[in-house]
Image (spheres, helix red, strand yellow):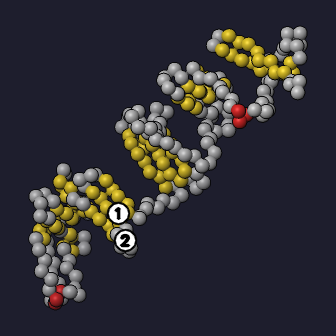
């Protein structure tokens, strides 16, 4: 051991270190390799401290209910990551979290106590949000304040394989008013809403596909060129499509 070094064993409480020019180029070991010591750095407020726990090989910042703020500065002025203990927030100022392929963020707990209720991550081609069970979901916005969502790309739900479709519900003014894509019925349902075509669609063509099962008699629909089945509650009818005389 050089004359500019000292070693400590046991718990060290650091109250104040006075700079010594003779130690400016020397290290101050706390304990020894594989035989460490606890070190406590006190603040000016009761229980506001930082502890190096050698037995747990862990840093503790503050105590339970007496947290301390922690700032991780970058190589650029004012760019940092800050843990604010009073607001319980981790803030990134001109900084970011970088995740590679197959790296995921796991959030929440399932009803049985297991973790990973929601998984978010990049699988190499898509950003994926996966529920940990059939009872979990992703909610954007709340009952008091709604949140706008902008999609700059295509909206796809379910998968192309048979049996992997997902219902889609667009709610209107109340619980009984909605537009719903029901995958079990392979139908688009309108409950308490109407379909309106404004002047923009004037002169536009609409194609109604006939699946072959909706046969009709020419004597019943004189001049009709096609028809489409219409289901209103328990009533089933047919909508005749005529060729315009113009």
Horizontally, residue 49 falls left or right of residue 107, namely: left
Q: Nearer the viewer, residue 236 or 148?
A: 148
Residue at 21 percent across and 59 percent down: it is 68
Q: Quadrant of the N terminus?
A: bottom left
- Secondary structure under badge 2? loop
Residue density around tag 1, few if under 14, some if 14–19, many if 20 or more, within 10 Å: some
Q: Is residue 158 left or right of residue 26?
A: right
> In x, y percent, where is residue 28?
19, 79
What is the crowding at mark 2: few (fewer than 14 residues within 10 Å), some, or many (at least 20)?
few
Mark closest to the chain's N terminus, 2 or 1 = 2
Query: Is any atom of residue 173 visible in this view?
Result: yes
**Residue at screen point 59% across, 23% down:** 193
Q: Are marks 2 and 1 in contact (CB under 8 Å)?
A: yes
Looking at the picture, does residue 226 appear above or below residue 95? Answer: above
Q: Position of residue 137 (x, y in %)?
A: 47, 36
Task: Classify residue 131 as left or right of residue 240.
Answer: left
Q: Secondary structure at mark 1?
A: strand
Q: Is residue 132 visible?
A: no
Q: Residue at image x 65%, y 23%?
A: 185
Which residue bears the numbered disc 1?
81
Query: Vertically, is 67 above or below 151?
Result: below
Between 112 and 189, the one lying in front of the other is 189
Query: x and y percent of residue 149 in the render?
Result: 52, 43
Which mark is drawn over residue 74?
A: 2
């Amino acid at each position: 051991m050089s004359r500019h070094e000292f070693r400590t064993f046991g718990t060290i409480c650091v109250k104040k270190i006075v700079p010594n020019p003779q130690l400016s180029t020397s290290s101050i070991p706390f304990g020894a390799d594989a035989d460490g010591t606890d070190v406590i750095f006190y603040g000016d407020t009761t229980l506001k401290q930082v502890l190096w726990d050698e037995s747990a090989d862990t840093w503790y910042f503050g105590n339970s209910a007496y947290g301390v703020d922690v700032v991780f500065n970058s190589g650029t002025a004012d760019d940092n990551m800050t843990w604010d203990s009073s607001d319980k927030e981790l803030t990134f100022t001109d900084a970011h979290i970088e995740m590679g392929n197959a790296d995921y963020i796991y959030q929440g707990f399932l009803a049985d106590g297991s973790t990973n209720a929601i998984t978010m991550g990049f699988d190499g081609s898509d950003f994926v949000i996966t529920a940990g069970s059939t009872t979990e979901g992703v909610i954007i916005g709340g009952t008091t304040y709604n949140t706008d969502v902008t999609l700059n790309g295509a909206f796809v739900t379910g998968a192309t394989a048979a049996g992997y479709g997902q219902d889609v519900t667009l709610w209107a003014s109340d619980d009984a008013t909605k537009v719903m894509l029901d995958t079990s019925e392979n139908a688009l349902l309108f409950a308490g809403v109407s379909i309106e075509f404004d002047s923009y669609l004037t002169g536009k063509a609409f194609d109604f596909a006939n699946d072959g099962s909706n046969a009709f008699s020419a004597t019943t629909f004189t001049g009709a060129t096609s028809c489409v089945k219409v289901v209103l509650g328990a009533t089933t009818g047919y909508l005749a499509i005529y060729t315009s005389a113009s």
